[in-house]
Amino acid sequence: MADPAFVQHDAKGEVHVLRLANPPVNTLRTEVRAGLLAGLNAAKAAGAKAVVLIGSGRMFSAGAEMTEFGKPRQPPSLTEVFDAIETFPGIVVAAIHGSALGGGLELALACHARLASPGAQVGLPEVKRGFVPGAGGTQRLPRLIGPEAAAKIIVSGDPVPAEQAVKLGFVDAIIEGDLEAGAVAWARANIGRTFTLARDRTDRISGQDPAAYDAVVAGLLKRTRGQESPKGCAEAVRASFTMPFEEGLAKERELFQTLVSGEQSKALRHIFFGEREVLRIPGMPADAKPLPVERLVVIGGGTMGGGIAMSAANFGVPVTIVETSDEALAKGLARCHANWERTVASGRLSQAEYEKRKALLTGSTDFEGTVAKADLVIEAVFENMEVKKEVFARLDKAARPGVVLASNTSTLSIDEIASATTRPELVLGMHFFSPANVMRLLENVRGAKSSWTAIATATEFGKRIGKLPVLVGNCDGFVGNRMTGKRTPQVEKLLLEGCLPQDIDRVMEGYGMAMGPLATGDLAGLDIGAAVRKARGTVAPIADAIVAQGRFGQKTGKGWYMYDEKRNRIPDPEVERIILEVAEKMQVRRRKISDEEILDRLLLPMVNEGARILEEGIAYRPIDIDVIFVNGFGWPAFRGGPMFWADTQGLKTVRDKLRRYAEATNDANLKPAALIEKLAAEGGTFAGMGR
Ligand code: NAI
């Protein structure tokens, strides 16, 4: 019999039920695989004609147990379980509720038939963890729905609703009502019927034209920027129609092994686990309770206030924007509405859902009256300390006692803002990223006096509105902007010493960044950086010369690049002329700079600042920094973030290069941080800190 702790076995006459019982998501850990195998053998011995596999709790199965990766494999393998299913003298039916993902779906694909509850999700997300499905998914799915449709699912890794899976042909029926009872009845009615197993089907693969397949795949791979697993997935699916089943399985296995032990998959798993880890805040007492939030009030309906308010309404939270005038309010609300309308027009939001969101978002110019009703306030007014302090003093008087007051400031001191109130323990930063309704990252900034209640409230509320909250300490720029701030001067120096904008962006995009730093500058507006430099009294001769020509970026049609009518960027000889002119004036002899040096000089200063941030306790752990960069700064997840990257280079190498660049460029900022010196001397890594 199956081990009832992991797989429950119920005999219902000729139909037996095997229920996965490994909460919360029924991963296929060793005990579950053993339980399934034992259960199938016991059902066979008892003369069962049909077996229903079903999940208990939230879902059918989320797939393999990732914590077992990289450890010696314990038998039985999934393949042995699948052999037992495929040679079962009767039918084995998978009954899916919630989701069947990865190995969970592969288990279902090995069955004779698949049933699902309405709205269940099925998919093979392995590509997102850096490898290919490893238990036959790339061979069985194409045999059920054709290689091109299978490649779309496997290369994207996105789940498919069960209803669509029925249309495509890999789910046999939707069962309304009680799934287990329905599945048992369905199995009983189908006893004796002949099913062709996926492995034996040839009808969907036999006519496949390889050239047509390659064309579809080329489209799918266009946006994968140096990530290996999508290519591996496409190659594995290709084997489904160019090789016999067993050879295809061997090909899949080989690709799986290579990818799963590679750097990219390690990086993706580092981020996958990291995104869960950052929510476990070190030192947070177990009894720290978030305050309930029924109504959010956002002060300021500009770019950020509007985006924050939309995020709340998107997740069903009633929210009111407070503005200073009717005009500003109308403009702010109209921007939110227009944004949603674009989503409706693109087909990604239903009209009914839009109406619901719109009704949740209200506006007012009555500051005191509105704030009095708030359970949480997020301020997003102009970035000016005097203005912020005035607003917080007013908030303190108007808000009910006990209500948390948060600021979306990106640079100002939370402690100074809090000092304008009589409740500094309830003041903290909630630093959203632009566009706030889209970006997942939320840096929650802990002031010197912020209480655990305030922190728990901001964390919980952030999660509720779809964000990934990472708790950071109070300093100029917090974590993300403080680190990228160290990259900007290097961009200027590289331009001076020999690079053109397109060289720098090519290297960074080749590394996998969504967009290079200069193209990003053009998108955000170069006048913003110029204003910051002016306010801080710093200069950047090349950037200043570009802005002096009225080249503010995309909004003026020209910046580091020129742009065609479709906003494609084009290298501009005029920019090259300006750069050469400044270099000449400054008597810099330009030289050819290698791609490796470009990458090092942009990434190493960030790593160095990251190390200082860890020394100061501004970030709790290296993983917090990595998660921040992947979720808020377009850092490719398959590179694992800046601190992970540094570990892959080796901290001795990082230290030596930093020392060398500090000397060569006479830049004290590039001197290795004490933490890097220490770890390099010990042969340590960031990942190993605190372990
Ligand atoms: P914005 O200029 O677009 O919006 C500010 C809005 O606040 C304006 O509509 C203004 O009318 C309103 N306002 C000013 N004083 C007010 C008061 N006393 N009561 C009610 N409303 C008032 O500015 P943006 O870009 O939205 O920035 C807001 C805050 O968010 C700043 O602290 C900024 O540093 C921060 N931030 C901005 C990011 C960005 O990318 N724009 C990213 C992250 C944070």
Image (cartoon, rainbow, N blue to C red):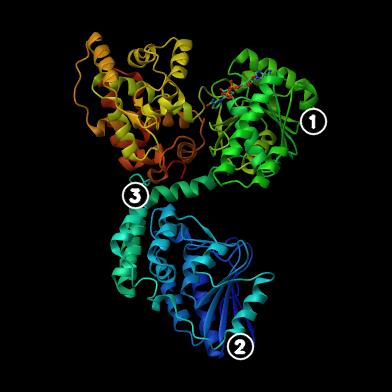
Disc sitting over residue 24 in the figure: none
Q: Does mark 2 have its CB less than 8 Å from ligand 1?
A: no
Residue 140, image x and y in percent? Answer: 41, 70
- Crowd tier of the residue under label 1, counting other residues whose Cα lies within 10 Å: few below 14, some 14–19, many 20 or above: some
- Does residue 77 show up? no
- Residue at mark 2 to residue at mark 3: CA–CA distance: 49 Å
Three-letter code for the amino acid on which mark 3 is drawn? Glu
Q: Is residue 153 left or right of residue 447?
A: left
Describe the element under mark 1 as helix, strand or loop: loop
- Residue underneath mark 3: 263
Residue 618: x percent and y percent? 52, 30
Q: Position of residue 206 (x, y in %)?
A: 34, 73
Quadrant of res 396: top right
How far, Cα to Cα, is label 2 from label 1?
61 Å
Q: Is residue 319 visible?
A: yes
Q: Residue at x 45, y 55 (%)?
A: 157
Mark 2 highlights which residue?
Answer: 14
Image depth: mark 3 or mark 1 in front = 1
The residue tagged 1 is 373
Q: Position of residue 81 (x, y in %)?
A: 46, 76
- Whichever of callouts 2 and 1 sits on the residue coming sooner in the sequence is 2
Q: Residue at x 39, y 34 (%)?
A: 515
Q: Amino acid at mark 1?
A: Lys
SS for dot 2: loop
Image quarter hosting the N terminus: bottom right
Q: Could you tell me which secondary element the residue under label 3 belongs to?
A: helix
Ligand 1: quadrant of the figure: top right
Q: Earlier in the sequence, mark 2 or mark 3?
A: 2
